[in-house]
Structures are given as structure tokens and as C-alpha cells.
Image (cartoon, rainbow, N blue to C red):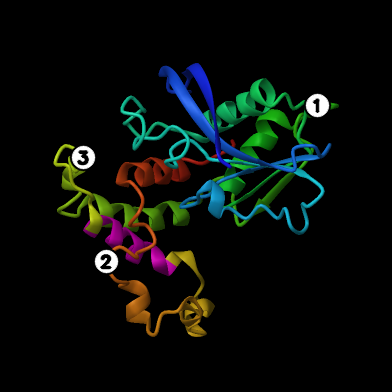
Amino acid sequence: GIQIFSIPSFEFISGVIKDIKVAYRSFNPTSTKTILIPTCYGGRINTTLNFTSGALKDYHVIVVAMLGNGESSSPSNDEGFPGDYSLRYPDCINAQYKLVTEHLGIKGLDAVMGFSMGGQQAYHWAVMHGSGDNPFVKNAVVICGSAKTSGHNYAFLEGPISALTTSHDYDNGNYRKNNIKPTQGLRAFGRAYAAWLTSAEWYRQELWREQGHPSLQAYLHPPLGEASYESWDAEDMLVLARMWQAGDIG
């Protein structure tokens, strides 16, 4: 199952120093070949494809929750988590490196593999720990990810971010003080994100039907409690989105 590694006095690149926790799950730990898979945007450890019954069945696979995703240290589970959206990918990689080396005692990774934001983390791993004659990271497997977030990607993220932050129940970030969940804002985020999540061809083929939705309207407006991002904390989503926008290995 999911395990927690605690890191005391972790220093974020913003200069903040505090204790943090990193959540992870280990598969096939006796294998001599090791691959790290960081989570993606909207991903949890147990919903992340780990390929342990297929291509990676002979590997020790470690699925790790990036900081901010609600499983590792995040605004939702740590009141002292940096609230200025200063979290960056190097923070995630530094925490994951401590997990892999100090806690799991691993001397090197055969690969880091990730999808979307997980892919951006893989790029950062390669840059930060993938050089030299005997690099710690031997390979980076990037799926639908970029070394630098494009202007177009940045702009599309502003849409769902704005849908959430301007919602009445988000209340300028005061929803926790009001002891409410910004459900309408989270649902609006999901609708704004929906057009970017899949392709035009996906919509043309009406593949939302394969998810059990009888109509496009039903896909975009599921019953209360069933929207894809409704279970998430708003600040977790925002801190990750801002990190995504700032992604740049240069």
C-alpha cells in the first residue's frame, strides 16, 4: 500500500524550510532494475498507470506523489505549506531524490517515467541527475510532456484556473475559513479543462459514451459529487497548475 517518508527541515527553492512528507508506493521491490513514476496532474498514486503487469513486470516500480497532490505534503494536509504558489518542479525532484536515496537506499534509477506533469518531472530528473559518466538516472521516458510549458499551454490553464478562482464558493481562497468546499468552482474547473483534456477527434467520435455518459451534456455536467475534480482540494489544484505553468528545465 501507500507509504509515507518524512523529511525534516526540507528547503524549498523559494527559501522556505519546513518538515514535509512524501507519499509513495513500491512494487516488486526485490527486482534489481528500478523505475520511478511521479504522478501527473489530477493523478493519485493508486490511479497512476504502473505497468507492473505488463512492460515493467520485471522492474522495481516506485510510484511517487508529487508535492501538492494531496497525498504528499500539500496545502490540503499541511497548514504551513507554501501558500504563494512558489512550488516548483526542482522541489519535487529534491524531495523524491531524498526518498529514493536516503530512505530506499537506491544507488541509481534505470529510468524515470511520467505522463504530462509526470513527464515534466522526468525531464527535470534527467537534467538534475542524468549527466556524467555514471548518471544516477539512466533514461527518461516522457509521455505527453514538455521540457518547457508553452505559451499556449500556459494560456489554456488560465481558463480552468479562472473558472475556479472566480467562483462564489471559492470566495477568494476563503473557503476553508468558511468551512465549505468550493464545489461549484471545482465543477467549473472541470468543464473548462474538459476541452483540453482530450482531442477534437475524441469528441468527434463521441468517446465520452465509452465512459457511460449518454450525452455530451451529461459528460460535462455529471450529477453532483461525480465530477472528476470534485474530490480535490482547490488549493492543491491551483498550486499544481501554477507549477505546471512555470515548468522550464532551462
Q: Is residue 147 visible?
A: no
Residue 224 - label: 2
Q: Nearer the viewer, residue 106 or 151?
A: 106
Magenta range: 184-195
Q: Secondary structure at mark 2?
A: loop
Q: Nearer the viewer, residue 243 or 24?
A: 24
Q: Secondary structure at mark 1?
A: loop
Nearer-N-terminus badge (2/3): 3
Where in the figure is residue 180, as x and y percent of width and height?
18, 47
Q: Residues within 10 Å of mark 1 (few under 14, many from 20)?
A: few
- Left or right: where 157 falls relative to 121: left
Q: Amino acid at mark 2?
A: Leu
Residue 132 - label: 1
Quadrant occupied by the N terminus? top right
Q: Main secondary structure of the magenta part?
A: helix
- Left or right: where 179 falls relative to 100: left
Q: Amino acid at mark 3?
A: Arg
Residue at numbered disc 3: 176
Q: Which mark is in front, 2 or 1?
A: 2
Nearer-N-terminus badge (2/1): 1
Measured Cα–Cα span from mark 2 to mark 3: 20 Å
Residue projecting furthest to the front: 1
Q: Residue at x 84, y 27 (%)?
A: 134
Measured Cα–Cα span from mark 2 to mark 1: 52 Å
Q: Quadrant of residue 25?
A: top right
Q: Is residue 242 above or below residue 82?
A: below
Q: Is residue 59 magenta?
A: no
Q: Residue at x 79, y 39 (%)?
A: 110
Q: Residue at x 47, y 79 (%)?
A: 203
Q: Is residue 126 visible?
A: yes
Residue 26 - label: none
Measured Cα–Cα span from mark 1 to mark 3: 47 Å
